[in-house]
Amino acid sequence: MQIDGEHLTLSGLYNVAFGNEFCSINELSAKLLDERRESLETNSMKKTIYGVNTGFGVMADHRISPEDLDALQRNIVLSHAAGVGEPLKEEHVRAVMLVRANSLLKGYSGVRKCVVQRILDLLNNGIVPIVPAKGSVGASGDLAPLAHIAMTLIGEGDCLVDGKLVSSSQALASKCLEPLVLKAKEGLSLLNGTALMAGLAGCSTYTASRLLDQAILVAAMSVDALMGSTSPFDERVHKARPHRGQTYVAKKLRESLEGSEIRTSHLDCDRVQDAYTLRTIPQVYGAVKDTIEYAEAILETEINSATDNPLIFENGDAISGGNFHGEPVALVADFLSIALTDLGNMIERRIDRLVNPKLNDLPAFLTNGEEGLNSGYMIWQYTAAALASENKTLAHPASADSIPTSGFQEDHVSMGAWGARKLWSILDNVATLISIEALLAFRALSFRHPKKSGSVIEQLFEEIAGIVPDHREDRYFGTEFSSVRELLFKRAGL
């Protein structure tokens, strides 16, 4: 994949982060970098420019002598590497690196081409800096985590190469790469941006968008297994309230349930209305889809933005602004966290309907074998409840908080890094909830056979049947849930 600072997509971000796709620099963008760098070097000899020949934050009034400019950039990297806690996932670090490289390619940061190329060298050679997860408040960029990445570029700190922990100097030498000597503004440019929150939130949003269709299909399987009505999915209902996501989900449900023999068998039953977790899937899942699409639009703008400070413009002007502030990402990360949490709430309630003998006409807890001797899938509803509850706590908006930093210079912060980190945790829990529902709906549907569901649902049924053993009596079920989760990710192209 070629990056140019303008056209990076969330799918491209995911493919590099999780699929190790090779990256290169667009040559026109590289030329722009050279022009802006030359302009910056010329103007910094005549003017005082923040972060180029001054100190940082509240020390911005201190002028730095020309002979100390390289030391200034090295010092900011080392001093700002103040992250703590468990390291980020390797894939997430790769996402952060790509976002930073793409942003720098826009030319507003004034860095040399070799700086961007070295980030891509790390990506293309499987060198992944160790980045502690905690330490960013998401205001003057994701300073601490980005400093840990920058340390690897200058041969300091530790990293992973092919999964093995080594020093950065060893890693660079093993790939015949020299540590960078950062020039004026380059250390600041590597640190000062929203790459962590944008990278993590981008990966979460892309994954959620791909999983949602599988979640809709699994929900449709549950509807048929629970003898639900298809009338609430009637196209006329949704034309009367034409939200785009709602319309999309209702159509997917109709397509999945089309031709169901199970539905035909109870068309004339006495039940007037289904519970909300069956009847309002289009309204709830549709709202989640709309939220995902909103987040996608914001994040694709962000990963193609200059989030540095100061920004260097065509005429040589260096303007100190606030593009490093993470509020746009922080708010959508919180918004999507809330949406996915509610999706999980609905899934957990359907899981209960699938196993609860008070709410269906299926064997209690989908048991097979001697009654009373076997507990079946009873405890998997407990697991689902635990995950849904955990998400409710995690969904508290990070962006609602702010603690001043840098001697009150940075007196309002976004907390977007934490928002993005917990978004991934919420998504991971929801993916597991979808997998639990899928296996339980599969088991429930097996009790409805030989009557068949819709062909799309039966296809998923057959795929699950091919990877999990028959259920005759109690056993350890954890492996089959993991297998179903893996299948759903594969079906989603993840």
Image: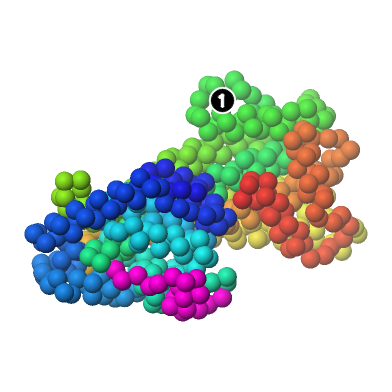
Taking the magenta stretch, the answer to whether it contains residue 370 is: no
Judge from the rendering whether residue 98 lies leftward or rightward of residue 39; answer left or right: right
Residue highlighted by disc 1: 238
Q: Quadrant of residue 390?
A: bottom right
Q: Residues within 10 Å of mark 1 (few under 14, many from 20)?
A: many
- Residue under the point 81% across and 55% down: 468
Where disc 1 sits, the SS reads helix
Would residue 446 be visible to someone looking at this image? yes
Eyeballing the image, is 36 above or below 175? Answer: above
Judge from the rendering whether residue 27 lies leftward or rightward of residue 230; answer left or right: left
Q: 44 or 224: nearer the eye?
A: 44
**Picture coordinates of residue 147, whole percent (x, y):** 35, 69
Judge from the rendering whether residue 125 lies leftward or rightward of residue 234; answer left or right: left
Would residue 299 be visible to someone looking at this image? no
**Picture coordinates of residue 29, whole percent (x, y):** 35, 47
**Picture coordinates of residue 290, whole percent (x, y):** 49, 37
- Residue under the point 15% across and 57% down: 42
Q: 296 or 348: nearer the eye?
A: 296
Q: Quadrant of residue 385?
A: bottom right
**Picture coordinates of residue 308, whole percent (x, y):** 27, 55
Q: Quadrant of residue 117?
A: bottom left
Q: Where are the magenta residues, as a range?
A: 164-182
Q: 213 or 306: nearer the eye?
A: 306
Query: The disc labelled 1 sits on which kind of residue?
Result: His
